[in-house]
Structures are given as C-alpha cells and as structure tokens.
Image (cartoon, grey):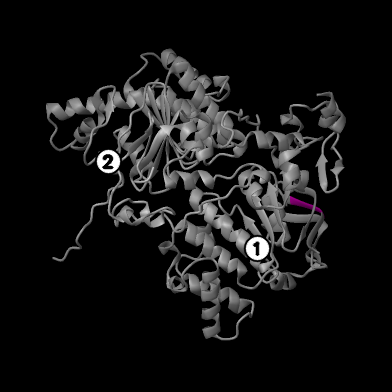
Amino acid sequence: MLRRPYKVVHAVDDVSFEVQRGEILALVGESGSGKTTVGMNVLGLQVPTAGRILFDHHDVADWARGNLVRGRTEDIASKRRREQVLALRRRAQIIFQDPYESLNPRQKVYETVSEPLEIHGIGRTKEEKEALVRKALEGSGLAPADHFWDRYPERLSGGQRQRLVIASALVLEPELLVADEPVSMLDVSIRAEILSLLNELREQRGITILYTTHDLATAGIFTDRMAVMYLGRIVELGPTEAVLSEPRHPYTQALVSVVPAPNPRRRRKQVVLEGEVPNPIDLPTGCRFHPRCPQAKEECSRIDPRPVPVSEDHQAACLFV
Amino acid sequence: MTTLEVRNLSVSYLSEEGALLNAAEDVSFQLNQGKSLGIVGESGCGKTTVMMALLRLLPDAGRIIQGQVILEGEDLLRYSEAEMSAVRWSKISIVFQGAMNALNPVRTIESQIAETLRIHDVEKTKQRERERAGELLEMVGIPPERGRQYPHQYSGGMRQRAVIAMALACNPRVIIADEPTTALDVMIQAQILKLLVRLQRELNLALIVVTHDLGVVAEICDNVLVMYGGRVAETGTGDAIFNDPQHPYTQRLLQAFPDIENPHAEMVSIPGIPPRLDDLPPGCRFAPRCYVCGDRCHKEMPPMIEYKPGHLFACHLDYRKIS
C-alpha cells in the first residue's frame, strides 16, 4: 500500500513560562500562533509531545497521558491518574470564546451551573448544591440568582451568557482559569464589564488567569504580564506595560503599531506586515519570523534566536534586541 | 460634490402579529465622492437596516416607510426593481460581512467575479472577463493565477480581499463595507484597512463602513454617524466625534473602548442592553441606559441640535447641563 509521507506539525515548540498565583498572564498571538494549544495543554485537555507542565508542583502532562489510555489498559496506575485529572479539572477551568456556542441551549441556568457539581460529586443535599450555584451566579454578576434560575440561554443577552459560562467555571472554586478570547464575540459596550469581572475574581479570590487573545488593547488594560507568540514560539515576554510601551521584538513592534487608537488625531505610523502567518508544516529556517521581518538580516535565516533578557523581567527572542 | 444623500429614511419590519416595528427612524446623512463615512453602534441599533435599505435589499418583512436615497441626483427609492438591479453593483455595491458566506464554495473565485461582469454586461467576451477578473484580483493583492482556486483554498484575509474585488468589479461610485474586518486577526485587519484606504483614494470611491469597532472608524473614516435604537444619536467629523463628543451615548461608547496608549484609563461598560424593536422607549431611545437623563428624556424624543457646523446630536441639552 502506498502511504503519503507524513510530517509532524509542531503547533507549539519549546515554550516556557511561569504564572504566579493570583497573576493574570496574557498569551497574545494571531491565529496559528499556538496560544490556544498552550491553554489546552495547561488544562490537560491535550497532551504535549515533550515537556512538563507543573501545576502546583504536579505534572499535568503526565496525568493527561494517563487519562488517554483509559478503557484499554485499565490498571491501578491509570485509574489513579484519572482521579488526578478529575481533581485537576476541579482546580483549573476554562472559559470559551463564544457564549452562543459553548452553552447547551436545552439546559436551564441552574442545570448548567450545577452540572459540574454532579460530575465532581460535590454537595450532598439539594440545599447545599443550590447554595453553591447561587454563590457562583451572584459572584459572576447574575444577581439575584433566583431571577435567572429557570431561564434558558436564549433568554439571556450576550454579556449575561458569558457571565453564565464564567459561573459554571466558578462553581468549582478553581484556582486557575484559562480564558480563551472571552470577549471577542461580545459588543464593545459590554467587554469592559466582563474584563472587570475577571479582574475582580483575581483580586477577591486570588484566581490565576491565563488570558489568550489576539487583541492587544484589551490585554493591555487588565493583565500583569504578556507573552507574545508567533508560530508556536514565545517571541517576547515581560510586564504588560513594558511590552506595549517598549516592544523589543520586531513582531511585537508591528503588532503594537497596528492596534487602532480610538482617536483620529493619533493615527500612527503603522508597520503592516505582508502576507500571513506561514503554515507550521513548513517552518522557516533560522528565526521563524525572518521571512516577514522588516528588520531581517542575513544571519536571521540561519540562526534560531534564543530568548535573551532585555531587562530583569523582560525577554525577547531576536538576534538584534 | 455630494454623491449620496439619505434624507429622513425610516424603515420598519412587519412582525408576525402584523405590527410595524421601527428599525430605523428619520436617518439622514450625506457622503461626498472620495470621502468615507463610518456608521457605528452596538448590535441592534439599526445600522445594518439602513445599509440594506440603501441597496433595497431588505428582507421580505422590511418596509421603507419614508425618506429618500439620492444617488448622483436620482432617488433610488423610486426606482423599479429592474432599474434598481442595474444600479446595484454598478453604482453602489457592498462588501459583505463574513467573507466565507458571501462566496459560493463550489465555484472558483475567478468565475464568480466573471459572473458579476457578465450579468452587468461590463465585458463582452469570456477572454476579457477572465482578464478583468485577473486585474481586479491583482488590485486587491491576490496573484491572478490564484483566481482559479476555490474559496476554501483561501485564508480568511484572502477571502475578504476576493469579496472586495467582486464589489469593485463594475466600477461602482459608492462602496458599503459591512464589518469588513470583524473576525480577522489584528495584522490581517490592518492589511484590509490599508487596502480599503488605498482603493478609496485610487478609485476616488465614496466609502461607507458599517461597524461596531470605533478603532476602525478612527483609523479610516472622515465622518462618523453614531446610531442608537434606530435613530441618529450624533454625527460629525471623526475629529469632532472622538475629541468633542456631545451625546451621552457617544461619550460612553468611547469610554468602553480600550486604548493601548492609555492602559490606566478606566474602561467603563454601558449597563443594560439596546432596546428591543417591539419595546422602544417613548422618549429618547437611550434614556433607560443614560446616566444624565431627566423626566423629559423619558417622555419626549429629543430634537437634533446643530452644535457646530456639521456636528449634530440628539439630546435634551438642558438636562445634560444640570449634570
């Protein structure tokens, strides 16, 4: 039989970063940069080919590998791992992009928020569960909770739907939230309220948030640090303010320059890159960004730059920073 | 010279119960050749209704109640359907939102452009149609040989370019772009905006950009029309709207927009949601969400006030002064 030679796509390659408890880290990049893949790996929803993901000293990647063999070699070790994955789910939750797609239209608000409790066997009595659901709904700004209890998602506005998605993640009282473009489908007028809700969760409950987005402007207003990704690599990482006000990597510089300023008097000189993010199946040699880099020099096509510190807590992966 | 003038346009939708719901009321604006106008507002504020009424492409339930749409001296609302189809694409055309849905998935890009040319009798021979399709693709930055590909072989940005090429096929004077960059990545968005600005200048087009993204408007539009609840809340030059906004809705909308150069500025939401068409407030449409409104705002529709030449807004001014 003939078979096409297969190639391996490295969606994310050699990415390292740390997030502190109670910190909000932005993972910024265009489609195909690998930001969503990183989020999925952090939650153990995908298994990395290599590398470790330490969540509170436990290796999530190892658990996720065990979870995948379920049903075949059901031994004690894999059963143990499955329990660990379940325990991880309780501590780390995700909020998806589109609250019109991520909610079950046939589930009422109460059912949506109480489902995670059933899965994790939390709350012995009906009253206990109701109290937890109430707390999650009101903590997400759907107050008074009774007012929403029996509604179907179609009876909620876009902002309320996203609050419901957040409530069903919050009900487990997670320590880590991966928020994957949580406001990009919402009207501008309600983006601010969802972002301030996330910020409140961090301030009041110390929740750690990984905010993946292509929108530098929203990332700029509420995240502490920012990792900019291009073709599966982190090209720049540092405090959000420093990355936006003094971007060091040419890719970050271009991205920052094209964010529209809400004022025609401040139209800036834009660095509009030609073409699009290449297919990760045929990665450029040397620096992955060099074919589109306005500042590329000869050596950029040969040498793959390592991240270098540009200040104490700010790094960029470019030969000429 | 005024290319397009809309006067007191009102559009309603016929509900299943037979009631007429006002989706756009008393909308007026002008657009000169070579200039651009941004129509902004949240979802449900009537901007899409106005746009579809200009093209006379309203859904079956849509009714144009009153008004005039004057394109180069002729009122489009008095045209027969046949006359209107001759004008659509050749004088006024549209770049639809969601480029994937606007393209036929089983035909090549080139043949879809050629079809437009054929219907409007722009080119006489198949050979010329293909050449012209190639020219149009080149104009929007797509290598002509890729015209023989299908929409699924294009990236999102290229599909958007292809849809723009199609809108330009019959040399229109006015182009309406409906959310031209929504759902595109930042860099692709910048490429598409740059392309629109270049085409507008080179072809001296009158451009209408319908969007909820104030950043896009600030970046490429000369004039702005802010809509709320189907009515014009404020209109003026981009500079006036962004630096001297008068209507409380415009002010709030600007505060809700994140500014990368000013990350510490507080970003404020507008509590509540735009009114439903079947439940429009009797007075000012924005009154239920307004932070400075008074009794009169809930009862009477505010008049349009000319604040400065060309800068108009609809608000009961007195109540704003008290605040």
Task: Indicate the chain on which mark 1 is placed.
Answer: B
Numbered disc total: 2
In-image side of B266 versus A285 (left or right): right
Badge 1: few (under 14), some or many (20 or more) residues near its Cα, within 10 Å?
many
In-image side of A272 versus A31 (left or right): right
Q: Position of residue A216 (x, y in %)?
A: 50, 39
Q: Position of residue B306 (x, y in %)?
A: 86, 43
Residue sitting at x 63%, y 34%:
B256
Q: Do the residues at discs 1 and 2 belong to one chain?
A: no
User: Which corner quadrant holds the N terminus of chain B?
Assistant: bottom right
User: Where residue B200 is drawn, which disc sits there?
Assistant: 1
Residue sitting at x 79%, y 63%:
B77
Please tell me in which quadrant of the rendered image residue A61 appears: top left
The front one of A312 and A225 is A312
Residue range of the region highlighted in magenta in the rendering: B8-12
Q: Position of residue A188 (x, y in %)?
A: 60, 38
The front one of B61 and A190 is A190
Badge 2: few (under 14), some or many (20 or more) residues near its Cα, within 10 Å?
few
Disc 1 residue type? Gln
Res. A67 in view = yes
Please tell me in which quadrant of the rendered image residue B208 appears: bottom right
Main secondary structure of the magenta stretch: strand
Q: Is residue A81 above or below residue A28?
A: above
User: Which corner quadrant holds the C terminus of chain B?
Assistant: top right
Give me the C-alpha separation between circle 1 and circle 2: 44 Å
Classify mark 2: helix, strand or loop. Answer: loop
Residue sitting at x 48%, y 21%:
A201
Give the labeled residue for mark 2: A14
Disc 2 residue type? Asp
